[in-house]
Amino acid sequence: MKNRLRFHFAYILPIRYPQRFIFSCLLILFGLLSVSVIAQTMPDDLRSLTVVGGKTLPETAVSIGKQFLGTPYVPNTLDINATEQLVVNLKAFDCTTYLETVLALSLAWHDLTDKQNQAQLNVLFRNYLTKLRYRNGAINGYASRLHYFSDWLRDNERKGLLKDVSGELPGCLSVAKPVSYMTTATYRYPHLSDPAIFKQMADTEAAISQQSFYFIPKKNLKQAEAHLREGDIIMLTAARPGLDMKHVGLAVRQGNRIHLLHASSEQGEVVITRYPLTDYVQWHKRLSGIRVARLKAPGTQPSPRPQ
Protein backbone atom coordinates (compact mmCIF):
# COMPACT_ATOMS: atom_id res chain seq x y z
CA MET A 1 0.00 0.00 0.00
CA LYS A 2 2.82 2.41 0.81
CA ASN A 3 4.42 1.86 -2.58
CA ARG A 4 1.08 2.38 -4.29
CA LEU A 5 0.45 5.62 -2.40
CA ARG A 6 3.86 6.91 -3.35
CA PHE A 7 3.14 6.11 -6.96
CA HIS A 8 -0.15 8.02 -6.95
CA PHE A 9 1.46 10.96 -5.18
CA ALA A 10 4.17 11.15 -7.79
CA TYR A 11 1.58 10.82 -10.50
CA ILE A 12 -0.66 13.68 -9.32
CA LEU A 13 2.14 16.06 -8.29
CA PRO A 14 2.62 17.53 -11.81
CA ILE A 15 -1.13 18.10 -12.09
CA ARG A 16 -1.86 19.70 -8.72
CA TYR A 17 1.44 21.54 -8.27
CA PRO A 18 2.80 22.33 -11.73
CA GLN A 19 5.09 25.14 -10.52
CA ARG A 20 6.74 22.91 -7.91
CA PHE A 21 7.11 20.10 -10.41
CA ILE A 22 8.75 22.32 -13.01
CA PHE A 23 11.03 23.87 -10.39
CA SER A 24 12.06 20.42 -9.14
CA CYS A 25 12.81 19.26 -12.68
CA LEU A 26 14.92 22.34 -13.31
CA LEU A 27 16.90 21.71 -10.13
CA ILE A 28 17.54 18.11 -11.13
CA LEU A 29 18.52 19.14 -14.65
CA PHE A 30 20.84 21.85 -13.34
CA GLY A 31 22.45 19.32 -10.99
CA LEU A 32 23.03 16.85 -13.80
CA LEU A 33 24.49 19.54 -16.03
CA SER A 34 26.75 20.72 -13.23
CA VAL A 35 28.07 17.22 -12.68
CA SER A 36 28.64 16.87 -16.42
CA VAL A 37 30.56 20.14 -16.63
CA ILE A 38 32.67 19.30 -13.60
CA ALA A 39 33.48 15.89 -15.02
CA GLN A 40 34.65 17.48 -18.25
CA THR A 41 36.69 20.27 -16.71
CA MET A 42 38.00 18.65 -13.54
CA PRO A 43 38.42 14.87 -13.68
CA ASP A 44 37.86 13.09 -10.38
CA ASP A 45 41.33 11.57 -10.55
CA LEU A 46 42.90 15.04 -10.90
CA ARG A 47 40.92 16.38 -7.94
CA SER A 48 42.04 13.46 -5.81
CA LEU A 49 45.68 13.78 -6.88
CA THR A 50 47.92 15.02 -4.10
CA VAL A 51 50.79 16.89 -5.71
CA VAL A 52 53.93 16.99 -3.58
CA GLY A 53 56.13 19.42 -5.43
CA GLY A 54 59.90 19.33 -5.29
CA LYS A 55 62.36 22.19 -5.36
CA THR A 56 62.95 21.57 -9.06
CA LEU A 57 60.79 20.49 -11.98
CA PRO A 58 62.51 17.08 -12.26
CA GLU A 59 61.92 16.41 -8.54
CA THR A 60 58.25 17.28 -8.96
CA ALA A 61 58.00 15.06 -12.05
CA VAL A 62 59.35 12.06 -10.14
CA SER A 63 57.02 12.75 -7.20
CA ILE A 64 53.97 12.99 -9.45
CA GLY A 65 55.09 10.09 -11.61
CA LYS A 66 55.30 7.77 -8.61
CA GLN A 67 51.71 8.58 -7.63
CA PHE A 68 50.58 6.76 -10.76
CA LEU A 69 52.40 3.52 -9.93
CA GLY A 70 50.02 0.65 -10.61
CA THR A 71 47.88 2.60 -13.09
CA PRO A 72 46.89 0.27 -15.96
CA TYR A 73 48.67 0.31 -19.29
CA VAL A 74 46.17 0.87 -22.13
CA PRO A 75 47.27 1.69 -25.70
CA ASN A 76 45.60 3.98 -28.24
CA THR A 77 43.71 6.14 -25.74
CA LEU A 78 44.27 9.23 -27.90
CA ASP A 79 42.49 7.77 -30.93
CA ILE A 80 38.98 7.56 -29.48
CA ASN A 81 37.58 10.57 -31.37
CA ALA A 82 36.75 10.97 -35.06
CA THR A 83 38.36 14.41 -35.06
CA GLU A 84 41.54 15.32 -33.22
CA GLN A 85 40.99 16.88 -29.80
CA LEU A 86 42.72 16.93 -26.45
CA VAL A 87 42.22 13.67 -24.56
CA VAL A 88 42.80 13.73 -20.81
CA ASN A 89 42.94 10.34 -19.13
CA LEU A 90 44.59 9.86 -15.76
CA LYS A 91 43.21 6.36 -15.24
CA ALA A 92 45.08 4.54 -18.02
CA PHE A 93 48.29 5.27 -19.92
CA ASP A 94 50.61 4.15 -22.62
CA CYS A 95 54.25 5.16 -22.25
CA THR A 96 53.80 8.44 -24.15
CA THR A 97 50.57 9.61 -22.50
CA TYR A 98 52.06 8.75 -19.10
CA LEU A 99 55.13 10.88 -19.72
CA GLU A 100 53.15 13.77 -21.20
CA THR A 101 50.69 13.74 -18.30
CA VAL A 102 53.42 13.75 -15.66
CA LEU A 103 55.37 16.52 -17.39
CA ALA A 104 52.26 18.66 -17.94
CA LEU A 105 51.22 18.31 -14.29
CA SER A 106 54.75 19.18 -13.15
CA LEU A 107 54.94 22.28 -15.33
CA ALA A 108 51.45 23.34 -14.26
CA TRP A 109 52.28 22.87 -10.58
CA HIS A 110 55.36 25.10 -10.83
CA ASP A 111 53.32 27.77 -12.62
CA LEU A 112 50.53 27.63 -10.04
CA THR A 113 50.46 30.74 -7.86
CA ASP A 114 47.87 29.37 -5.43
CA LYS A 115 48.74 25.73 -4.74
CA GLN A 116 45.22 25.12 -3.38
CA ASN A 117 43.49 26.33 -6.55
CA GLN A 118 42.43 23.09 -8.26
CA ALA A 119 40.56 24.88 -11.04
CA GLN A 120 43.64 26.88 -12.00
CA LEU A 121 45.77 23.73 -11.85
CA ASN A 122 43.37 22.01 -14.24
CA VAL A 123 43.52 24.87 -16.75
CA LEU A 124 47.32 25.05 -16.63
CA PHE A 125 47.59 21.27 -16.88
CA ARG A 126 45.44 21.14 -20.01
CA ASN A 127 47.34 24.02 -21.57
CA TYR A 128 50.69 22.33 -20.98
CA LEU A 129 49.38 18.96 -22.15
CA THR A 130 48.28 20.57 -25.41
CA LYS A 131 51.59 22.39 -25.72
CA LEU A 132 53.61 19.21 -25.19
CA ARG A 133 51.52 16.93 -27.39
CA TYR A 134 50.99 19.07 -30.49
CA ARG A 135 53.22 20.81 -32.99
CA ASN A 136 53.65 24.44 -32.01
CA GLY A 137 51.23 23.75 -29.14
CA ALA A 138 48.17 23.90 -31.41
CA ILE A 139 45.65 21.18 -32.29
CA ASN A 140 45.24 21.18 -36.05
CA GLY A 141 44.19 17.68 -37.03
CA TYR A 142 45.68 14.23 -36.53
CA ALA A 143 49.03 15.09 -38.14
CA SER A 144 49.57 18.00 -35.73
CA ARG A 145 50.06 15.48 -32.93
CA LEU A 146 53.77 14.77 -32.39
CA HIS A 147 53.66 11.04 -33.12
CA TYR A 148 57.41 10.48 -33.54
CA PHE A 149 59.45 11.17 -30.44
CA SER A 150 62.30 12.74 -32.43
CA ASP A 151 59.73 15.25 -33.62
CA TRP A 152 58.27 15.58 -30.10
CA LEU A 153 61.70 16.25 -28.61
CA ARG A 154 62.75 18.82 -31.18
CA ASP A 155 59.43 20.67 -31.08
CA ASN A 156 59.32 20.87 -27.28
CA GLU A 157 62.94 21.96 -27.12
CA ARG A 158 62.06 24.74 -29.55
CA LYS A 159 59.20 25.75 -27.23
CA GLY A 160 61.68 26.04 -24.36
CA LEU A 161 60.08 23.30 -22.25
CA LEU A 162 63.07 20.97 -22.17
CA LYS A 163 66.61 20.47 -23.39
CA ASP A 164 68.07 17.53 -25.30
CA VAL A 165 71.26 16.69 -23.38
CA SER A 166 72.13 13.51 -25.27
CA GLY A 167 75.06 15.21 -27.00
CA GLU A 168 76.56 16.23 -23.64
CA LEU A 169 76.82 12.70 -22.26
CA PRO A 170 79.91 10.50 -22.57
CA GLY A 171 79.72 7.83 -25.22
CA CYS A 172 77.21 9.69 -27.40
CA LEU A 173 77.16 9.32 -31.17
CA SER A 174 75.59 11.46 -33.88
CA VAL A 175 73.43 9.58 -36.36
CA ALA A 176 70.70 10.13 -38.93
CA LYS A 177 67.97 7.53 -39.15
CA PRO A 178 65.18 7.53 -41.75
CA VAL A 179 61.71 6.95 -40.31
CA SER A 180 58.75 5.43 -42.14
CA TYR A 181 57.02 3.24 -39.58
CA MET A 182 53.61 4.91 -39.60
CA THR A 183 53.17 5.14 -43.36
CA THR A 184 54.38 1.56 -43.87
CA ALA A 185 52.18 0.15 -41.08
CA THR A 186 48.95 1.97 -41.85
CA TYR A 187 46.87 -0.91 -40.49
CA ARG A 188 47.91 0.34 -37.05
CA TYR A 189 46.77 3.89 -37.79
CA PRO A 190 43.21 4.05 -39.20
CA HIS A 191 43.41 7.84 -39.62
CA LEU A 192 46.01 7.33 -42.35
CA SER A 193 43.32 5.91 -44.63
CA ASP A 194 42.58 9.56 -45.38
CA PRO A 195 44.94 10.48 -48.28
CA ALA A 196 45.41 14.04 -47.02
CA ILE A 197 46.45 12.88 -43.54
CA PHE A 198 48.68 10.19 -45.05
CA LYS A 199 50.51 12.83 -47.10
CA GLN A 200 50.95 15.04 -44.04
CA MET A 201 52.51 12.15 -42.11
CA ALA A 202 54.70 11.21 -45.07
CA ASP A 203 55.96 14.80 -45.21
CA THR A 204 56.64 14.71 -41.46
CA GLU A 205 58.59 11.46 -41.82
CA ALA A 206 60.64 12.93 -44.66
CA ALA A 207 61.54 15.96 -42.54
CA ILE A 208 62.54 13.83 -39.54
CA SER A 209 64.61 11.55 -41.76
CA GLN A 210 66.82 14.46 -42.78
CA GLN A 211 67.71 15.38 -39.20
CA SER A 212 70.70 13.98 -37.35
CA PHE A 213 70.61 13.48 -33.59
CA TYR A 214 72.77 12.36 -30.69
CA PHE A 215 72.11 9.16 -28.80
CA ILE A 216 73.99 6.87 -26.43
CA PRO A 217 74.28 3.36 -27.90
CA LYS A 218 73.68 0.52 -25.48
CA LYS A 219 77.36 -0.46 -25.49
CA ASN A 220 78.21 2.97 -23.99
CA LEU A 221 75.38 3.20 -21.47
CA LYS A 222 77.46 2.17 -18.50
CA GLN A 223 79.75 5.19 -18.82
CA ALA A 224 76.82 7.55 -19.41
CA GLU A 225 74.73 6.29 -16.48
CA ALA A 226 76.79 8.15 -13.88
CA HIS A 227 75.85 11.42 -15.60
CA LEU A 228 72.10 10.79 -15.61
CA ARG A 229 69.95 12.66 -13.11
CA GLU A 230 66.75 11.69 -11.37
CA GLY A 231 63.86 13.14 -13.34
CA ASP A 232 65.65 12.98 -16.69
CA ILE A 233 63.39 12.16 -19.63
CA ILE A 234 64.64 8.86 -21.05
CA MET A 235 63.79 7.93 -24.64
CA LEU A 236 64.74 4.41 -25.66
CA THR A 237 65.84 4.25 -29.28
CA ALA A 238 64.57 1.50 -31.56
CA ALA A 239 66.85 -1.05 -33.19
CA ARG A 240 64.44 -1.75 -36.03
CA PRO A 241 64.62 0.23 -39.28
CA GLY A 242 62.07 2.98 -39.87
CA LEU A 243 61.41 3.79 -36.20
CA ASP A 244 63.24 6.35 -34.07
CA MET A 245 62.14 5.66 -30.48
CA LYS A 246 60.37 2.65 -29.07
CA HIS A 247 59.71 3.61 -25.44
CA VAL A 248 59.91 6.52 -22.99
CA GLY A 249 59.95 7.11 -19.24
CA LEU A 250 61.61 8.98 -16.38
CA ALA A 251 64.92 8.28 -14.68
CA VAL A 252 64.64 7.45 -10.97
CA ARG A 253 67.42 6.57 -8.59
CA GLN A 254 67.24 3.32 -6.65
CA GLY A 255 70.25 3.07 -4.37
CA ASN A 256 73.21 4.13 -6.50
CA ARG A 257 71.72 3.06 -9.85
CA ILE A 258 69.32 4.68 -12.32
CA HIS A 259 66.09 2.81 -13.06
CA LEU A 260 63.18 3.65 -15.37
CA LEU A 261 59.78 4.85 -14.16
CA HIS A 262 57.40 4.11 -17.03
CA ALA A 263 54.08 2.73 -18.26
CA SER A 264 55.05 -0.82 -19.17
CA SER A 265 53.19 -2.82 -21.81
CA GLU A 266 55.00 -5.96 -20.62
CA GLN A 267 53.81 -5.60 -17.02
CA GLY A 268 50.53 -3.93 -17.88
CA GLU A 269 50.89 -0.94 -15.57
CA VAL A 270 53.07 1.94 -14.43
CA VAL A 271 56.16 0.50 -12.75
CA ILE A 272 59.78 1.13 -11.87
CA THR A 273 62.06 -1.31 -13.63
CA ARG A 274 63.30 -4.08 -11.41
CA TYR A 275 66.76 -3.79 -12.92
CA PRO A 276 68.87 -0.68 -13.62
CA LEU A 277 68.27 1.19 -16.86
CA THR A 278 71.59 0.06 -18.35
CA ASP A 279 70.72 -3.60 -17.82
CA TYR A 280 67.14 -3.09 -18.99
CA VAL A 281 68.31 -1.68 -22.33
CA GLN A 282 71.04 -4.31 -22.73
CA TRP A 283 68.56 -7.16 -22.31
CA HIS A 284 66.02 -5.82 -24.81
CA LYS A 285 67.10 -6.72 -28.33
CA ARG A 286 64.63 -4.25 -29.84
CA LEU A 287 66.42 -1.31 -28.19
CA SER A 288 69.62 0.27 -29.50
CA GLY A 289 70.30 2.90 -26.83
CA ILE A 290 68.83 6.04 -25.27
CA ARG A 291 68.32 9.74 -25.75
CA VAL A 292 68.04 12.04 -22.74
CA ALA A 293 66.27 15.35 -22.15
CA ARG A 294 65.73 17.57 -19.12
CA LEU A 295 62.80 19.78 -18.18
CA LYS A 296 63.42 23.50 -18.12
CA ALA A 297 61.70 26.11 -16.00
CA PRO A 298 58.96 27.90 -17.99
CA GLY A 299 60.21 31.07 -19.62
CA THR A 300 63.78 29.84 -19.95
CA GLN A 301 65.21 30.48 -23.38
CA PRO A 302 66.02 27.38 -25.44
CA SER A 303 69.71 26.46 -25.52
CA PRO A 304 71.50 26.17 -28.87
CA ARG A 305 71.33 22.67 -30.32
CA PRO A 306 74.72 20.91 -30.63
CA GLN A 307 75.94 20.81 -34.23
Image (cartoon, rainbow, N blue to C red):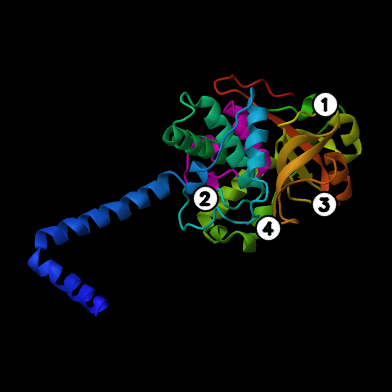
Mark in the foreground, 3 or 1: 1
Q: Which residue is mark 2?
A: 142
* Residue stretch rendered in magenta on the structure: 134-162
Quarter containing the C terminus: top right
147 relative position to 113: left or right: right
Crowding near pointer 2: few (<14 within 10 Å), some, many (20+)? many
N-term-proximal mark, 3 vs 2: 2
Dot 4 falls on a residue whose secondary structure is helix
N-term-proximal mark, 2 vs 4: 2
Dot 1 falls on a residue whose secondary structure is loop
Q: Which residue is mark 4?
A: 184
Q: Of the residues shown, which amino acid type is indicated by label 3?
A: Arg
Along the viewing direction, whichever of 143 and 210 lies nearer the viewer: 143
Dot 2 falls on a residue whose secondary structure is helix
Q: Of the residues shown, which amino acid type is indicated by label 1?
A: His
Q: Residue furthest left?
A: 16
Q: Residue at x 21, y 55 (%)?
A: 26
Q: Which residue is mark 1?
A: 227
Q: Position of residue 106 (x, y in %)?
A: 58, 32
288 relative position to 5: left or right: right
Mark in the foreground, 3 or 2: 3
Q: Is residue 212 visible?
A: yes
Which disc is residue 39 wearing? none
Mark in the foreground, 2 or 1: 1
Q: Residue at x 48, y 57 (%)?
A: 81
N-term-proximal mark, 4 vs 3: 4
Q: Is residue 139 magenta?
A: yes
